[in-house]
Image (cartoon, rainbow, N blue to C red):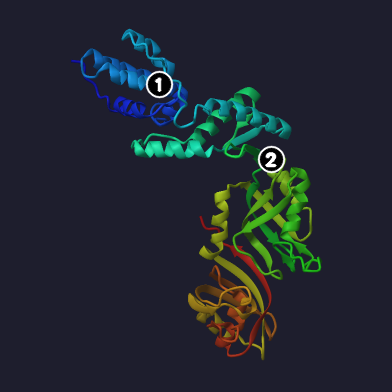
Amino acid sequence: MYSTDVQLIDKVLEILEKYTLCDRCLGRLFASLGRGWDNSERGKALKIAALMELHRRIKEGIENVEKLKLISLHCGTIAEKLLKEFKSSQDINLEPCHICKSTIDELIGRYTKLAIEKLNELKVRRFLIGVKPPKYIAETEKELAESMGIQYWESARSEFKRVIGKKVQEITGLKVDFENPEVIVVLDMENDEISVIIPSILIRGRYWKIGRRISQSKWIRKDGTKKYPLSLEEVLELALPMIKAERAIIHAAGREDVDVRMLGSGRPAIFEYYRPLKRDVDLKELEKIVNNNQWVKVSFEAIARREHVKNYKTMAAKGFKIYRALILVENGVNDEELKILEEKFRNAVIHQWTPKRVLHRRRNILRTKIVYEIKVRKITHHIIEALIKCEGGLYVRELISGDDNRTSPSFTSVLNKPAKCIELDVLYVHETP
């Protein structure tokens, strides 16, 4: 007696006993089994193997011809010759596929043509296909796979993307690019629409603000005038003509106040150029264009990905920073008091309520931050300079002034006399992984 492990074939027979399926839809139910085959090839092979196994069982008296006739109804013309062996006059049923209504090859051909037409209009070299499949296909295949307990299936959406992308590439010579496509052509089969997504160019780097009164983003008043003479965004926009982008956006590891300079190490950031029509850019050439100004400098280090943006935005609260502060102390200060300051702020725990100056836009919460160390020197009797190494997220101005005892301890509370930051610079921003 011939014996073999026929669990896979049994599952195929079980499916075909209930449903009419085209080769491609049957193959997609077992898409993660085997490599290098198109789902239409996989589905045809499964039908042949299932019919062969059923034929064997009939010959050995395990199954009857009636089951073969039933399953043949759901296989299409592939079972025609086998039925004739049993002198069956039954016509092969050409019912539509239960999943795709026998439209899937037509959809692939139609949307391949539409994608090519759109790509020819855009004159690009690297592309990616996005697909919203017909709802009836997506819902039916999921319901069938789950009801039959199939774990190896892939969605029609995945197949459409892969097959159409491959056909477009073969016909046009354009390249499918998953990492850095110039354009994503979105095929909405449910609504019979085609649209285009132009991915942003994201660049990992850092920036320096050499002057004061420079904001990160453009700050426009209600009357249409600028609140500050310059912004980092405007500097980045100097490169818009080169890459034919619509606008520039900055995603930085925190931000400094507009009157605070960013010196030293520079602030880590992701620079985004939105909807660029030109992607093959030399970062150094781009950097040179942006740096053609007096007050802001940037370093473009490497192309980044969208998932990096979140990392950079949370980086500010994780690492440490070093500030330089110029401080006015009322009634003056002596060397002994400076020593006391350095001692009190060595690994000091700071309790800080949201500063009054930002309460209009931030919740009033209590933060606990650490000042790791400070170094101070006297400039004049009333003015001192302090280097402050502290945890990210600490409000340094309030560390100095005390903010009416909302920050404790503070320079004011330790010196027992009012202290005020009159000039502040960021010297170092720790870049966490």
Residue 87 vertical placement versus 203 (above, below): above
Residue 289 shows in the view? no
**397 and 215: which is toward the camera:** 215
Q: Nearer the viewer, residue 284 or 128?
A: 128
For marks 1 and 2 on the same chain, the one whose residue lies earlier in the sequence:
1
Q: CA distance from mark 1 to mark 2?
A: 48 Å
SS type, badge 1: loop
Q: Position of residue 228 (x, y in %)?
A: 77, 67
Rendered location of residue 305, percent (x, y) = 58, 47
Q: Which mark is residue 315?
A: none
Q: Residue 193, located in which quarter of the rendered image? A: top right
Q: Position of residue 65 (x, y in %)?
A: 28, 16
Image disc number at residue 75: 1
Give the quadrant of the N terminus: top left
Q: Residue at x 69, y 62 (%)?
A: 216
User: Residue 279 — which label?
Assistant: 2
Identify the residue at the far front of this view.
Answer: 89
Amino acid at the residue labelled 2: Arg
